[in-house]
Amino acid sequence: MDSASLTLLGDYIASQGAGDRALELYMEAKEVGRAADTAVTVASDLASTGSWMTLARLGRTLAQDRPAAGHIPVPDHMAKHRAPWWRRRFVRLARQSSGWTRNTPARLSLLTADARVEQPLPDLTPSPVLPDASWLEPLPPPAKLLTAVHRMTPDLTAHLFGELRVAFRDHPVEIWLSGRGRAVFEYLLVNRHSKVRRDRLMRIFWPEASSDAARNSLNVAIHGLRQSLRPAAGDTAVVIHRDQAYFIEPALDIWIDVEAFEDRLKAAHQHLASTEFVQAEGAFEEATWLYQGEFLADDPYEEWAIVTREHLRLCYLDALDRLGALRLNSGDYAGCVAVCLKLLACDSCREDAHCRLMRCYSRQGQVQLALRQYHACAAALRTELDVAPAPATADLFNCLRRREAV
């Protein structure tokens, strides 16, 4: 979606009281003014739930866009301060909501720093229940944050959704000296619960090379991989070679977003089976937030990853579909709209998502939006599949035209 569409959607969702979801859309659309206003509004909620990483991310994003934010109205009594007015309000609301006192621990003192000093917004050190490598953490919705992240800093944190990000405690791997070494590391992470035979790696990554050439290439790749990891991992042994096989050191405490995603999906389906719909909705929500892009999106030509990538994509779409249905049934129409739009952004021919949007708009009194959604559905089906909407979809459209409740 373009910036204008994202902004309009953000305005609509904000009007329904879903400020956190609207803020996400404003930030994606680079609407710094709206994002700042909305951030100030929801800051107290974020602080009261201990969502310091979300506060830090918002602050950093807004600070990076400060030149573009010059149009934000500044109250007269704050004009004398050099720092942006929203930053001062941000800090004040956070302190009030969290019950901070003069005895606030030193490790959180950066949050209450005097905003009058002209300096980049500092990185925040998370509270003890959050991992130190905060920039690597997926950002679930604020209300779910404390239950979705692990309570101890792992030895190794890896994000395989979207762009590859790896860190050892709070030290990110910044430079990969070997592209093949990086690919081998990704494969070992995905298969970290078993040892991978050397011959298997040779067949996967150098299928057309002779045995000697493939073995030499693997040795070079492993050497480059270890050199890449050393600045972050130090002397910690990470990739082990033993008995003609390679594997990740099993003693390491490892957190991988793909595993967390699958765990949340498993929990969501268990809650569904037990008719625990509120818990199921929360688990699906956490899972969809962990999905930050396609599996190994920056390595699209690795053949071994194709099947896994498609499987995870389908799991994500199914999670969005089930989350949308749960929100519709619970009366959270603004939340359902947001989920359905994400689903349609991935697959514009999902007729069920179009119908769900039509029902949401209608129940909120936005019948014209519901009718327009039907035409968008028909156009997508005609363009992509050269088919007409299903009879049930057409019946829903006719009910809407007659202003019947749906």
Image (spheres, grey):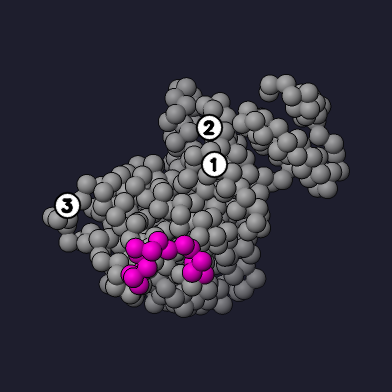
The reply to whether dot 3 and dot 1 touch (C-beta < 8 Å) is no
When the figure is inspected, residue 84 is found, relative to residue 255, above or below; the finding is below
Left or right: residue 375 compared with residue 57: right
Quadrant in the rendering for residue 360:
top right
Q: Nearer the viewer, residue 47 or 66?
A: 66
Q: For mark 1, what is the residue?
A: 15
Q: Nearer the viewer, residue 45 or 325?
A: 45
Which residues fall within the magenta stretch?
Answer: 68-83
* Residue 51 in the image, given as x and y percentages of width and height: 34, 50
Of tags 1 and 2, which is closer to the observer?
1
Amino acid type shown at disc 1: Ser
Of tags 3 and 1, which is closer to the observer?
1
Q: For mark 2, what is the residue?
A: 332
When the figure is inspected, residue 211 is found, relative to residue 35, above or below; the finding is below
65 drawn magenta: no
Q: Nearer the viewer, residue 132 or 217?
A: 132
Left or right: residue 307 compared with residue 157: right
Residue at 66% in and 49% down: 345
Q: Quadrant of the N terminus?
A: bottom right
Residue at 35% in and 56% down: 90
* Residue 4 in the image, given as x and y percentages of width and height: 65, 56
Residue at 46% in and 51% down: 38
Q: Mark 3 Cα within 10 Å, few/some/many (few <14, many 20+)? A: few
Q: How many marks?
A: 3
Amino acid type shown at disc 3: Thr
